[in-house]
Structure formats: structure tokens, C-alpha cells
């Protein structure tokens, strides 16, 4: 059935993911490992109980061969935080069973999502790749890794709104949830957030940020291709930012173009690639999100961590 064995395996599963369908998915994964003992030398499953719990549970995978994370981008982010707290020799490879609303990391590695049996098959028939991570430290002494995205401005405000609406059981998911929050937030208009951006060793540039996204993978918001050329194995982070403040109709038009990554051709949008980025908001904090979770601060030091983590990817993965 499999072309390799997963070895000592821990599954960290969020039972609340995908509107509560994660609990059923976790039980199906448990039955799979109990039925096919040959795919691992040992198996254990731990369920998350609260935000941040996945970070603690991932640390329990020290010395194991494989950590499988079942859940959305948020629990993947938390689990990676736990893994990166382990020494390189004790850190297992990561595999994911995506069960979420956005599933942007799954899109980055060309994995199936919200289908646990298919995800298991892709893990077993896949291969190991070493991926980069982003790392950010703020002026509050806090630091965190990110797998997919770090962004500031209206897009971060939208991410906060989708998180709130999802918690209130809006009934919407993925790109539809992101799009409806986007229309609500963008229709209110904005003059932007005064910011200072420094890319690698270049001269700082000042603008009023509507969008300032730093991406390790190409999408967020359930498939919006904000940095369509981003590749988590190239040793660089991709940046997308505005250099002018558009009016509301133009802003909503850019949202539509972003679904296919065509917004990058607009004269008000710039893109870049870098190893180090500095972002400062000299007047007041701007909304900020990291892999869909809130982050606060006014000054941020961001850098890429090349080849930071081994990940199991499907055969369809293009890199």
C-alpha cells in the first residue's frame, strides 16, 4: 500500500476544525492506523483542547519520525511553532491532513483537503521536501515562525473578521468567507496606514499601506494568489504592497483580480523578493495577521529561514 513507512508517528488533531468535522476525521484516521499497523512502527493521537494547545502537543513529538497535523492553517501554524522549538536532531518531519476553511498551506503543496482518506494516501505515496519558513520578531519582544503568510493593513483586518465570523458559525468557509469579509471591510474605505518598509539592505520607503503581505506560499484567504510566484523552497520571501491608495471601486476591483493573481499587474501594486524585511508603523499600530492569527506591534523584523522544516508532500507537488 505504501512506498515507505512513517516510523514513530504522532497525530495532532483539532476536533473543532472544518466546523466540527475534524472530530470525525480524526476518528477515521485513528481507525486507519489501527487497521494498517504496517505503515508506522508506533502511533499515538492527541486532540487539541484550546488555542495554542497544538504547540504544546507538537513538542511531544521530539524524537519521533513523523508528526501528522489534522486541522486548518491555524493548527498547522501552532504545530510548526512547537516543532521549531525542538532541536534539529529531535524534530520529526511534518505531514498534514488539511481540514480547514482556507487550507492555503494545502494549496501550496498541492495537497487534497477536507478528505482525510485521500490525504493519508498522499502522505504515504508522497516524498519529503525541505521547506523555508518565515520568522518575525516585533517590538514587544515576541517572535514567531510563519508557514504561509504574514500581512498588514486591510487584508489583515479581513483575516481578523473572518476569524470572528467563523467563531460565530457564519456558515461560510474558504474563499467565500474571505470574499464577503473583504467586501465589507474594503467598502468602508481607508486612507491606509502610514508605514516604512525596508527590503534587504535597500533604502526605506514610506507609504500608506492598504496591503503589505509577506508570503512564503502564494495564497491566503482560501486561494487568493496574493504573491502568485512565491515558492517555499527558494530561500526568499515574496512581498506584495501598494504604492498608492486606491478608491473603493478600484480596491474592490483589485480584490477580484487577486483571486487569480492578476492584481500584481496594477500600477499601484509592487512586488519584491527578499531575505530580510523591516516594517514599521510610526504613527499607530496597523492590523496584522500571521497564518490567520492576530499579531500586534508597531515594528517588525522579518526574515526567511531557509530549509527549516522537512515536510511530506504529494506526488503532485510542483517543486
Image: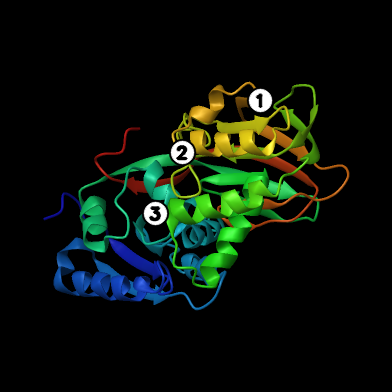
Mark 3 secondary-structure assignment: strand
The residue tagged with tag 2: helix, strand or loop? Answer: loop
Real-space Cα separation, disc 3 to disc 1, in angstroms: 38 Å
Q: Which of marks 2 and 3 is nearer the N terminus?
A: 3
Q: In this view, does 316 lie above or below 35?
A: above
Reading the image, the residue beneath label 3 is 94
Residue bearing mark 1? 268
Distance from disc 1 to disc 2, alpha carbons, whole Å, reads: 17 Å
Q: In which quarter of the image is the C terminus?
A: top left
Q: Foreground mark, 3 or 1?
A: 1
Residue in view at x 20 percent, y 51 percent:
4
Task: Name the side, left or right, on which 110 lies relative to 185.
Answer: left
Q: What element carries label 1?
A: loop
Tell me where residue 24 sits by quadrant: bottom left
Query: Which is more N-terminal, label 2 or label 1?
Result: 2
Quarter of the picture holding the N terminus: bottom left
- Tell me the residue that label 2 is attached to: 259
Q: Is residue 15 visible to us here?
A: yes
Residue 170: x %, y % from top left? 49, 68
Residue 216 pos. (x, y %): 52, 39
Amino acid at each position: 500500500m505504501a512506498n515507505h513507512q512513517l516510523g514513530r508517528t504522532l497525530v495532532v488533531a483539532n476536533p473543532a476544525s472544518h466546523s466540527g468535522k475534524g472530530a470525525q476525521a480524526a476518528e477515521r484516521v485513528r481507525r486507519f492506523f489501527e487497521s494498517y499497523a504496517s505503515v508506522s512502527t508506533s502511533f499515538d493521537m492527541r486532540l487539541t483542547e484550546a488555542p495554542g494547545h497544538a504547540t504544546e502537543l507538537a513538542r511531544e513529538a521530539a524524537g519521533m519520525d513523523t508528526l501528522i497535523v489534522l486541522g486548518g492553517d491555524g493548527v498547522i501554524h501552532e504545530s510548526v511553532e512547537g516543532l521549531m522549538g525542538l532541536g534539529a536532531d529531535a524534530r520529526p518531519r511534518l505531514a498534514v491532513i488539511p481540514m480547514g476553511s482556507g487550507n492555503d498551506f494545502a494549496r501550496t503543496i498541492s495537497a487534497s483537503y477536507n478528505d482525510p482518506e485521500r490525504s493519508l494516501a498522499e502522505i504515504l505515496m508522497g516524498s519529503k521536501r525541505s521547506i523555508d519558513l518565515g520568522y518575525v520578531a516585533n517590538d514587544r519582544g515576541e517572535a514567531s515562525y510563519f508557514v504561509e503568510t504574514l500581512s498588514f493593513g486591510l487584508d489583515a483586518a479581513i483575516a481578523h473578521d473572518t476569524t470572528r465570523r467563523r467563531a460565530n458559525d457564519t456558515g461560510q468557509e474558504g474563499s467565500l468567507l474571505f470574499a464577503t469579509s473583504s467586501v465589507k471591510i474594503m467598502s468602508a474605505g481607508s486612507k491606509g496606514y502610514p508605514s516604512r518598509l525596508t527590503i534587504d539592505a535597500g533604502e526605506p520607503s514610506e507609504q500608506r499601506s492598504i496591503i503589505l503581505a509577506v508570503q512564503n506560499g502564494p495564497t491566503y484567504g482560501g486561494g487568493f494568489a496574493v504573491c502568485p510566484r512565491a515558492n517555499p523552497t527558494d530561500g526568499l520571501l515574496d512581498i506584495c504592497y501598494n504604492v498608492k491608495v486606491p478608491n473603493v471601486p478600484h480596491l474592490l476591483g483589485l480584490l477580484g483580480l487577486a483571486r487569480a493573481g492578476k492584481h500584481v499587474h496594477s500600477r499601484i501594486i509592487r512586488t519584491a523578493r527578499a531575505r530580510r524585511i523591516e516594517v514599521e508603523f510610526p504613527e499607530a499600530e496597523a492590523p496584522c495577521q500571521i497564518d490567520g492569527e492576530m499579531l500586534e506591534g508597531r515594528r517588525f523584523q522579518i526574515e526567511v529561514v531557509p530549509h527549516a522544516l522537512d515536510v511530506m508532500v504529494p506526488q503532485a507537488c510542483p517543486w
